[in-house]
Amino acid sequence: MERIYNFNPGPAALPLAVLEEVQSELLNFKGSGISILESSHRAKEYEAVNSEAEALIKELLAVPENYRVLFLQGGANTQFAAVPLNLIAPEKHADYILTGTWAQKAYDEAKKFAAVNAIASTKEENFSRIPAMDEIKVTENPVYVHLCSNNTIFGTQWQTYPDFGNIPIVADMSSDIMSRSIDVSKFSLIYAGAQKNLGPAGVTAVIIRNDLLENIPANIPTMLRYDIHAKNNSLYNTPPCFAVYMVNLVCKWIKNNGSLAAVEKINDEKAALIYNTIDNSGGFYKGHAVKDSRSKMNITFRLPDEDLEKAFVAEATKQGMIGLKGHRSVGGIRASIYNATPLEACKTLSEFMKVFQDKNC
Ligand SMILES: *Cc1c(COP(=O)(O)O)cnc(C)c1O
């Protein structure tokens, strides 16, 4: 059977080379005589996978020495609660920038546990852009400013991260981690559910600066405590072994393909193919995101009417391109083109878009 092009927003495409590697060692992991799925998380084979995955993430993202990488469960949604619970002491507060559904959810969840302020929002414009620096009014001495790096649903992305001087950023990078190089030292904490750009569902990576592990309030749930997970190298309880194993293989794949510089270059090329098709369509395709806020991971656009959008999705599916239906809060089409989506998929989609337009306008 042929594999098809997968534009799903998450869980999403995985590199074929990684899937083949998983397949080849599924029954007998590194000569252990058992599958990694059957291994103890205390076995040396798994401990090697766990520490290798942390080391590779640090290497690829150039994470400074004074940070840890943790592998946790509960998805990015759990981090919406864990971040304020761990980081905001009772008399302190934090600021949130609202750029979409996930940023809003992070803010709403934090509000349950701590004093937080929404300091900028583009909701009025249906989150079609990232706010400009002069629209962001940071309060006095927040513990952090929270932002969502890439807005998966609306198709916008911070092109460069804002600079708030001494105030660190906490970022949800679920849908663009490892898609480009970043300066980790600007962030006190980065979190990302793996199922878009890092691996399969089931594990969430948290990159945290070590000093934040020092003063975590005593009364928060053990499983949400970053210090406990750090002290135990993410092995406090049974971790999602298979997901971490696959994250490790995805990181190796990135490294073998030229690391983030090469990944970023090809991601630029992939996104340009589709955005150029939108921009050259004479208005047949209309992008949702304002140009200078466009995401390179999730491309959102509309067609002249909903019937055409339905026909577009149906015809694309017939031609072996799935996952293109937009989220209901934007409508239209969303092409999610994470690291594992090959250039060829984007070429095929942009050709399809041209043909579809010729047939239907
Ligand atoms: C998908 C997504 C989430 C939700 O992640 P879960 O792992 O399902 O909790 C949060 N934030 C962003 C930016 C996402 O893309």
Image (cartoon, helix red, strand yellow):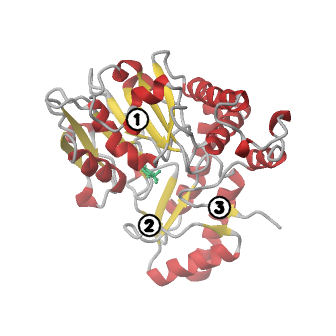
Which residue occupies 57% across, 76% down?
312
Image quadrant containing the C terminus: bottom right
Q: Distance between the residues labelled 1 and 3?
A: 28 Å
Which residue occupies 71% across, 73% down?
319
**4 with respect to 108 (left or right):** right
- Residue 84 versus residue 63: which sits nearer the camera? 84
- Residue 228 vs 80, above or below: the answer is above
Q: Is mark 1 on a helix, strand or loop?
A: loop
- Residue 133 vs 80, above or below: the answer is above
Classify mark 1 as within 8 Å of ligand 1 or not, answering yes or no: no
Residue type indicated by callout 1: Thr
To which residue does mark 1 refer? Answer: 160
Residue type indicated by callout 2: His
Q: Specify few, some or many for label 2: CA neighbours under 10 Å numbering under 14, 14-19, or 20 or more.
A: some
Classify mark 3 as within 8 Å of ligand 1 or not, answering yes or no: no
Tell me where residue 122 appears, x and y as whole percent. Answer: 26, 53
Q: Distance between the residues labelled 2 and 1?
A: 25 Å
Q: Residue furthest top?
A: 65
Q: Which of marks 2 and 3 is nearer the N terminus?
A: 3
Tell me where residue 250 appears, x and y as whole percent. Answer: 67, 40
Q: Specify few, some or many for label 1: CA neighbours under 10 Å numbering under 14, 14-19, or 20 or more.
A: few
**353 with respect to 80 (left or right):** right
**Within the image, what quadrant is residue 55 found in?**
top right
- Residue 107 versus residue 169: which sits nearer the camera? 107
Q: Which of marks 2 and 1 is nearer the N terminus?
A: 1
To which residue does mark 2 refer? Answer: 327
Residue 292 in sight in this render? no
Q: Residue 6 carries which label?
A: 3
